[in-house]
Image (tube, helix red, strand yellow):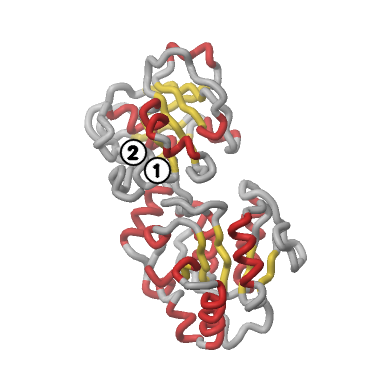
Amino acid sequence: MMTSARLKIPGSLKSTQLLVLAWTGHFFGSDYLAPRRIANPDGDDIELYFTQDRRRLAEANAVWFHAPSITDLPRAKNQPWILMSMESDANYPALKNPYTRLAFDLSMTYRLDADIPCIYPNWRHYGTFLEPPPVHKGKSSGALAVYIASNPVEYRDTYVRELMEYIPVDSLGSCLNNAHIKDFVAGGWSSRGTWSSILSVLPRYKFYLAFENSQTIDYVTERAFHALVCGVVPVYLGAANVREFMPDDDAVIIASEFSSVAELADYLRYLDANDVAYEKHLSWKRDGYSERFRRLVDLGSIDSQLRMAVKLTHGCDKSCRCGGRLRELGEIE
């Protein structure tokens, strides 16, 4: 069934119907390749169809590749190639290889300088983000922070293990597990049950250790946004430019800005004992978020597949931002 969305259509269109060949499999749900329609007030609607039938290569308007799933490539290149990934380039170095960039015509990644950015925050999953935070007055009676990870990553597990020597931390996933909460469901990020379970448990704590599986520019995942929507202060370790993704500069505590784990622990203890100082990190819930954050979430709320269709039909070059690019390539590396 076609899904629909409102999206501004720039300029003239080369085509109003697109067939995109998904050359690879992917990690997403079955609806990822569902047909889509974009309402175009200035002309015919844009209709996007996917096929996984490689025999239709010659008739496809473009070929789409999920970078972590690539095992082979077409022998000839007769239409635009699109490289897609929401996985970190630290874990998949080919994503930042200049020869890889040359082989593909359009990038569709988590990077803000991608032709079609695929970012995590959106209004559909998180609402307005402005629900009042939970009330935490005075020192915590239980664990001060929570850590939820089931995929072992040495740098973050090592950091959390040391932090546990200074402050009480509940670890609810399989990594460093030391606490159990009834009905809490740990597991992969794609499980909606897991997503709901995390959102239900976070308000018990003042801080969420939102540590990414790697540290690279723009790779800011659902961990940070889970904390924001729940009104829990994220203690973040990952992308150096994470504040570009925050509703306010004070909305996040960045672990790497402290000289040691002990210094971070001292700061968290200070906030635990000082309600006014703690609530400053949540003042954006009352005062509202920056226009930069609003633009980011607006973009994330439009399916990247739809923005890909706009990019393909516009007939423009890479300098055009019609796919949603928020930053010029090479501005941050």
Three-letter amino acid code of the residue under disc 2: Gly
Please, what secondary structure does the residue beneath circle 2 have? loop
Total labels: the figure holds 2
The residue located at (48%, 16%) in the rendering is 74
The residue located at (63%, 83%) in the rendering is 140
Q: Position of residue 43 (x, y in %)?
A: 27, 28
Q: Which residue does the numbered mark 2 point to in the structure image?
A: 323
Q: Position of residue 279 (x, y in %)?
A: 47, 80
The answer to whether any part of residue 193 appears in the image is no
The residue located at (37%, 66%) in the rendering is 289
**Drawn side of residue 231 relative to residue 178, left or right:** left
Q: Which residue does the numbered mark 1 point to in the structure image?
A: 117
- Is there a contact, CB below 8 Å, between mark 2 and mark 1? yes
Q: Position of residue 307 (x, y in %)?
A: 38, 37
Mark 2 vs mark 1: which is more N-terminal?
1
Q: Quadrant of residue 226?
A: bottom right
**Drawn side of residue 332 relative to residue 236, left or right:** left
**Drawn side of residue 264 relative to residue 241, left or right:** right
